[in-house]
């Protein structure tokens, strides 16, 4: 097990009139090599949860374990954790601050105290993985790039740390359709071809249906469901009670089944609908 939370509770502003319990006794396991999606309505506790995974937030009670070792609060412990767990915030392009793309991506590796040759190698590799030519854009100011490019630069900065676990908090928020597709393709590449364990925080059911092998549904700071996309999306009415929905293809497939059509379960993306239709047509033709 790569990461585990045990009875994780987090309270903001405890002991004040503004006290808010954001997480309540959350128990969660993240397996090496999986792509896990955390979904929930705004204010459900999604971002609070994942910010515990690299020690950015400390539990009020309970604990977080990385490869069996409890996350500590001393600087050396946090440095070890952040070498292994990378976190990309929502709208990360707003956090770019160096004068050039190269310097921005190099910031994290340099903080690890790596030799300059290793820093340069990691920067070039991370930019290339994100589909950016290091020779072409490395010397450019980050804010001369498009919004999608800036977000990829921000992700390259996380990848240059060479984490084992990559946490992406709403990575497609605010992107146009092309930028969104490019970002999701990058996530798929990092998971399938680079072997990264990925935790994707999203409110887009279509996105998680396409990418995730397991979903965790959080509401009111508590985990309400966990399972495969098929298992979760079949519980449509429970999701709706929590302010969530299901992918449009899942709604259509459900309506067709209710009308007596022979539509198999597990239809929740355009691709799965296409495959099911082709299968039915092939069967009819045979």
Image: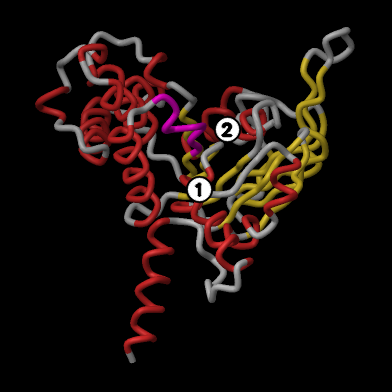
Q: In this view of the protein, which residue sits in the foreground, 93 or 283?
A: 283
Q: In the figure, residue 26 lies in which quadrant?
A: top right
Q: Label 1, on which residue?
A: 208
Q: Which structural element holds mark 1? A: helix
Gap in Å between the C-alphas at discs 1 and 2?
22 Å
Residue 14 position within the rendered picture, expressed as x and y whole percent measured from the top left = 84, 15
For marks 1 and 2, give the one nearer the viewer: 1
Q: Looking at the figure, which quarter contains the N terminus?
A: bottom right
Q: In this view of the protein, which residue sits in the foreground, 205 or 2?
A: 205
Q: Which color scheme is applied?
A: secondary structure
Q: Is residue 151 above or below residue 247?
A: above
Q: Which mark is residue 106?
A: none
**Residue density around tag 2, few if under 14, some if 14–19, many if 20 or more, within 10 Å:** many
Q: Label 2, on which residue?
A: 54
Q: In this view of the protein, which residue sits in the foreground, 93 or 75?
A: 93
Q: Residue at x 33, y 34 (%)?
A: 177
Q: Residue at x 62, y 47 (%)?
A: 3
Report the span colored magenta.
Answer: 167-174
Instruction: Give the mark nearer the N terminus: 1 vs 2.
Output: 2
**Residue density around tag 1, few if under 14, some if 14–19, many if 20 or more, within 10 Å:** many
Q: Residue at x 10, y 27 (%)?
A: 135
Q: How many marks?
A: 2
Q: Looking at the figure, which quarter contains the C terminus?
A: bottom left
Residue 111 position within the rendered picture, expressed as x and y whole percent measured from the top left = 40, 21
| Magenta segment, prevailing SS (helix, strand or loop) | loop
Q: In this view of the protein, which residue sits in the foreground, 90 or 130?
A: 90
């Amino acid at each position: 097990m790569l990461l585990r939370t045990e009875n994780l509770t987090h309270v903001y502003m405890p002991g004040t009139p503004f006290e808010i319990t954001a997480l309540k006794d959350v128990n969660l396991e993240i397996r090496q090599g999986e792509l896990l999606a955390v979904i929930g309505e705004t204010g459900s506790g999604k971002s609070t949860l994942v910010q515990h995974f690299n020690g950015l937030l400390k539990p009020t009670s309970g604990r977080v374990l990385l490869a069996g070792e409890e996350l500590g609060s001393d600087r050396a412990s946090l440095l070890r954790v952040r070498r292994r767990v990378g976190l990309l915030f929502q709208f990360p392009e707003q956090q770019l601050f160096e004068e050039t793309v190269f310097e921005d991506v190099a910031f994290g590796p340099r903080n690890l105290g790596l030799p300059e040759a290793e820093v340069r190698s990691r920067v070039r590799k991370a930019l290339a993985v994100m589909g950016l030519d290091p020779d072409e854009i490395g010397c450019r100011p980050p804010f001369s790039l498009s919004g999608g490019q800036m977000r990829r630069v921000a992700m390259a900065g996380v990848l240059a740390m060479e984490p084992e676990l990559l946490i992406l908090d709403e990575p497609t928020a605010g992107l146009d359709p092309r930028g969104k597709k490019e970002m999701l393709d990058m996530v798929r590449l990092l998971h399938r071809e680079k072997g990264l364990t990925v935790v994707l925080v999203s409110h887009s059911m279509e996105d998680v249906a396409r990418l995730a092998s397991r979903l965790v549904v959080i509401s009111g700071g508590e985990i309400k469901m966990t399972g495969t996309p098929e298992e979760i999306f079949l519980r449509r009415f429970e999701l709706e009670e929590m302010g969530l929905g299901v992918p449009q293809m899942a709604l259509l497939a459900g309506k067709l089944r209710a009308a007596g059509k022979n539509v198999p379960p597990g239809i929740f993306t355009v691709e799965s609908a296409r495959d099911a239709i082709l299968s039915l047509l092939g069967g009819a033709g045979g």
